């Protein structure tokens, strides 16, 4: 059978949400889509299917035409069909008709990102990172084993990473293998489509959804509904939604389910913070906007003045309205200025709120935007995710397990899958701290779980790590990322253990590493943030350039979140002899650490 038809059918055969059916879309091709004839290969699939560009107003297309090279690449050949390309490239490479080097450059560098395939050209040419979408960070043991099976053949570079958006990335992937992996993901109700470049990124929710007595809103339904909104075609119900396929830039949404704000709403373009309506007591969300981190600018979210009810229609409609305005009106020329915060500032917060209300009203769905509600003020102590903790369900506990820097070998993936099958009915939850959590473990089974060999001895996976080594987060860094100024994950894991051995602290100290100022490792939100940067050092009497870092101190998460905007130190060499004394001093001075 023709490969396109097969994959088209396979891609459409299953729905995208993990636990919920796809949303019943009210707005099938709202916002004036123009239809175009697409995909006609071997005379098999020829359909009137809109592209990402079909949804853009003329004015936006004109700005895109004069926009950045990426805008031009998107206009030239719409990336919504990159999945078709990758199946064709894979077939031709497998059949010896071409090599990966012959893939069109704009596909390699840009368009294939829409399928979640990011070429690691600088570090491992010909090998890709495949980024998935894992709404609310929930996976199962079958998926975990599948990840292991996919990457194992790639040897040392065949690893699985848990990301700072509670997501999964597979490493070492080749173009010729991609279709089988994509089909395998789709068969397991997951996808890699629209996970990178100018897409709405992984929906971050509450890792304790449904199992926590302090929960205010169960975020799972909302994460799944929003995931459907952005990556499920509402007409064909195939994966990939053209309506949101030509955004001006990446877009992050996080939904918090409790006052802990485990989702980090303050560093997302849209953050939904649970809060009861002060008049009616009804549960809903205050909407915060514009949080982001980048080389050019780091911004904390600001209050939008809006509150919505915690129902599916309100959440989806609000996000759809903001996305529509963002898609059509944001900057298309300067990618550094194309994040939501710049657009909100251009409008002014009140005017932006009015524009959102007008947009929501125009959909005629009966959704109302209310004024922002007062946040709770009584004392609240943010909880921990690692370790064994009670659940709202009597007799059951959640068990948080450290995965150092989120990096998992195929063997470790299988160990976690086995643990999940034995203790948590196959369910595994990912956290933005790049760790995992087993929900619904019977109290009676905890002793047996804690004694499992894969959580003890030399194993990297731990339930009760030290307060420093257990709270290390790290971006990808130079092993795979071409933008990195330094290697991060290996340093981060080692240094966490070394500091643990040197000092005693009385609370978790969150040390985050990031290889460059893009801050994927969110250093500004950390207690101590280490960002790759230049440094110099005397070596054999010569002043040499060496790998170094800037150090940020004092970021806060949770209800009183705060970003540390400026580094307290710069140009610190990464060598233990230089970095460790500086960090020990900071730990003593700022966090009450005592040297052992
Ligand atoms: Fe990121 C670009 C990795 C979370 C801000 N990020 C990249 C690229 C794609 C650059 C590249 O092509 O190599 C990195 C891929 C490296 C690789 O091989 O893994 C990359 N970002 C990551 C991940 C994997 C870090 C991690 O180890 O966990 C995270 C994947 C999240 C996901 O599952 O989707 C990741 N990136 C973040 C975050 C944190 C967050 O979302 O909470 C941020 C800051 C928040 C934000 O976006 O505002 C972040 N990444 C960036 C930026 C700066 C964005 C900007 O507006 O300029 C870039 C550069 C860009 O987009 O041009 C970037
Ligand atoms: Fe790469 Fe920089 Fe992001 Fe680290 S912070 S993953 S080095 S882009």
Image: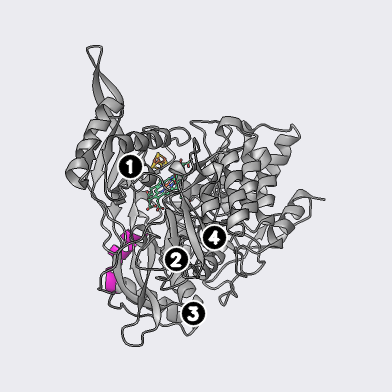
- Residue ID at (72%, 37%): 92
Which corner quadrant holds the C terminus?
top left
* Marked residue nearer the N-terminal end (2 or 4): 2
* Marked residue nearer the N-terminal end (4 or 1): 4
Name the mark on residue 517: 1
Q: Secondary structure at mark 1?
A: loop
Crowding near the residue tagged with mark 2, few <14, some 14–19, many ≥20 C-alpha atoms within 10 Å = many
Q: Give the magenta part as a residue range.
A: 340-350
Q: Nearer the viewer, mark 2 or mark 4?
A: 4
Q: Nearer the viewer, mark 2 or mark 1?
A: 1
Identify the main secondary structure in magenta. helix
**Residue at mark 3 to residue at mark 2: CA–CA distance:** 14 Å
- Residue ID at (48%, 50%): 197
Crowding near the residue tagged with mark 1, few <14, some 14–19, many ≥20 C-alpha atoms within 10 Å = many
Q: Is mark 1 within 8 Å of ligand 2?
A: yes
Whether the magenta-drawn stretch holds residue 346 is answered as yes
Q: Secondary structure at mark 3?
A: loop
Q: Nearer the viewer, mark 4 or mark 1?
A: 4
Crowding near the residue tagged with mark 3, few <14, some 14–19, many ≥20 C-alpha atoms within 10 Å = some
Quadrant of the image where one finds ligand 2 = top left
Residue at label 4? 444
Q: Nearer the viewer, mark 1 or mark 3?
A: 1
Q: Do the numbered discs 2 and 4 sit on residues whose CB atoms are within 8 Å?
A: no
Residue at label 3? 363
* Marked residue nearer the N-terminal end (2 or 1): 2
- Residue ID at (64%, 69%): 235
**Residue at mark 2 to residue at mark 1: CA–CA distance:** 26 Å
**Colouring rule applied to residues:** one colour
Whether the magenta-drawn stretch holds residue 126 is answered as no
Residue at label 2? 323
**Residue at mark 1 to residue at mark 3: CA–CA distance:** 39 Å
């Amino acid at each position: 059978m023709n490969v396109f038809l097969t994959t088209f059918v396979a891609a459409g055969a299953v729905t995208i949400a993990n636990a919920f059916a796809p949303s019943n879309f009210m707005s099938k091709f709202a916002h004036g889509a123009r239809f175009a004839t697409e995909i006609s290969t071997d005379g098999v699939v020829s359909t009137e299917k809109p592209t990402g560009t079909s949804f853009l107003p003329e004015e936006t297309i004109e700005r895109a035409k004069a926009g950045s090279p990426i805008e031009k690449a998107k206009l030239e050949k719409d990336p919504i069909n990159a999945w078709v390309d990758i199946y064709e490239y894979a077939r031709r490479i497998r059949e010896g008709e071409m090599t990966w080097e012959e893939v069109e450059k704009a596909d390699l560098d840009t368009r294939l990102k829409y399928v979640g395939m990011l070429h690691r050209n600088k570090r491992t040419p010909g090998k890709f990172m495949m980024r998935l979408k894992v709404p609310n960070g929930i996976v199962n043991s079958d998926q975990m084993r599948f990840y292991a099976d996919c990457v194992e053949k790639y040897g040392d570079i065949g690893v699985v990473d848990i990301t700072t958006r509670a997501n999964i990335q597979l490493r070492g992937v080749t173009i010729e293998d991609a279709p089988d992996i994509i089909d395998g993901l789709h068969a397991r109700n997951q996808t890699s489509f629209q996970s990178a470049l100018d897409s709405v990124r992984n929906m971050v929710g509450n890792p304790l959804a449904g199992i926590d007595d302090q929960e205010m809103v169960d975020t799972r339904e909302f994460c799944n509904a929003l995931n459907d909104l952005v990556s499920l075609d509402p007409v064909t119900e195939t994966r990939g939604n053209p309506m949101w396929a030509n955004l001006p830039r990446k877009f992050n949404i996080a939904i918090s389910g409790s006052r802990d704000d485990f989702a980090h709403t303050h560093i997302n373009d849209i953050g939904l913070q649970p809060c009861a309506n002060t008049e009616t007591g009804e549960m809903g969300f205050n909407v915060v906007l514009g949080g982001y981190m980048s080389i050019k600018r780091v911004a904390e979210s600001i209050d939008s003045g809006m509150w919505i009810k915690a129902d599916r229609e309100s959440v989806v409609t609000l996000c759809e309205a903001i996305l529509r305005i963002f898609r059509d009106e944001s900057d298309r020329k300067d990618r550094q200025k194309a994040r939501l915060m710049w657009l909100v500032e251009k409008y002014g917060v009140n005017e932006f709120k009015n524009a959102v209300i007008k947009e929501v009203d125009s959909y005629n769905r009966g959704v109302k935007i209310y004024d922002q509600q007062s946040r709770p003020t009584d004392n609240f102590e943010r909880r921990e995710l690692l370790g064994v903790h009670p659940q709202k369900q009597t007799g059951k506990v959640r068990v948080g397990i450290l995965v150092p820097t989120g990096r998992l070998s195929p063997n470790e993936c299988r160990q976690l899958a086995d643990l999940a099958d034995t203790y948590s009915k196959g369910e595994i939850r990912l956290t933005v701290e790049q760790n995992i959590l087993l929900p619904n473990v019977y109290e009676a089974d905890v002793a047996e779980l804690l004694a499992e060999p894969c959580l003890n001895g030399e194993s990297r996976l731990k339930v009760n790590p030290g307060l420093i080594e257990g709270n290390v987060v790290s971006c990808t860094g130079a092993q795979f990322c071409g933008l990195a100024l330094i290697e991060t994950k290996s340093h981060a894991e080692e240094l966490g253990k070394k500091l643990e051995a040197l000092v005693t602290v009385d609370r978790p100290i969150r040390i985050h590493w990031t290889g460059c100022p893009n801050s994927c490792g969110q250093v500004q939100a950390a207690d101590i943030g280490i960002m790759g940067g230049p440094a110099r050092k005397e070596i054999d009497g010569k002043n040499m350039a060496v790998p170094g870092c800037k150090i940020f101190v004092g970021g806060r998460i949770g209800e009183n979140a705060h970003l540390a905007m400026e580094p307290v130190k710069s140009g610190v060499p990464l060598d233990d002899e230089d970095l460790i004394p500086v960090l020990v001093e900071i730990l003593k001075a700022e966090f009450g650490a005592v040297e052992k």
